[in-house]
Structures are given as C-alpha cells and as structure tokens.
C-alpha cells in the first residue's frame, strides 16, 4: 500500500466534526470496556492528540503491535 504524502487532516488543528465523532466513539468504547477514562476532549483535540490517543489505545489492546508516531 503506498504511503500518503501528507496527513488528510492538519495535525496541529482541531479535528473536523467527523473526526470529533469518531474519537468520541473510541473514547466511549475504551471507557466502557476498560474503565480507562482518558484526559482528552474530542471537541478540542488536535490531530496530534487524537493520533497519540489512538496509538496508546492500540498499544494497550494489542501489546505486541508496534505503532508509528507522527
């Protein structure tokens, strides 16, 4: 699979509405199934914060999987 040239969402800007919704869903599922309540607000999160959260969440769910920071 070819690599994307740039991020689809500027990582230093707040997430667009769909990104906010998807991050909120990920946080809700994480909280429901693990009890982990992250300190991130989907409405104010930047692309970097969302990416860091998802990498952390992935590492907790799949400990052997290597994530790639941005």
Image (tube, rainbow, N blue to C red):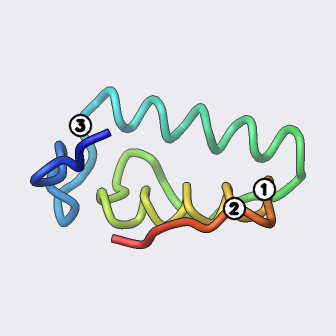
In what element is the residue under mark 2?
loop
Q: From mark 3 to mark 2, how far is it between C-alphas?
A: 28 Å
Q: Callout 1: 10 Å neighbours few (<14), some, many (20+)? A: few
The answer to whether the residue labelled 3 contacts the one labelled 1, judged by CB atoms less than 8 Å apart, is no
- Please report whichever mark, 3 or 1, sits nearer to the chain's N-terminal start: 3
Q: From mark 3 to mark 1, how far is it between C-alphas?
A: 27 Å
Q: Callout 2: 10 Å neighbours few (<14), some, many (20+)? A: few
Could you say which disc has been placed on residue 62 in the image?
1
Q: Position of residue 12 (x, y in %)?
A: 18, 66
What residue appears at the point 23 percent right and 49 percent down from the top-left corner?
3
What residue appears at the point 62 percent right and 39 percent down from the top-left corner?
26
Q: Nearer the viewer, mark 3 or mark 2?
A: 2
Q: Is residue 61 left or right of residue 67?
A: right
Q: Which residue is mark 3?
A: 16
In what element is the residue under mark 3?
loop
Q: Hey, which quadrant is residue 29 in on the image?
A: top right
Task: Say which quadrant the C terminus sits in.
Answer: bottom left
- Is residue 14 shown above or below 2? below
The answer to whether the residue labelled 1 contacts the one labelled 2, judged by CB atoms less than 8 Å apart, is yes
């Amino acid at each position: 699979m070819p690599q994307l040239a740039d991020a689809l969402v500027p990582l230093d800007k707040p997430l667009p509405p769909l990104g906010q919704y998807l991050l909120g869903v990920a946080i809700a599922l994480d909280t429901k199934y693990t009890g982990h309540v992250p300190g991130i607000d989907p409405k104010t999160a930047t692309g970097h914060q969302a990416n860091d959260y998802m990498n952390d969440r992935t590492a907790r769910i799949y400990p052997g999987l290597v994530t790639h920071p941005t």
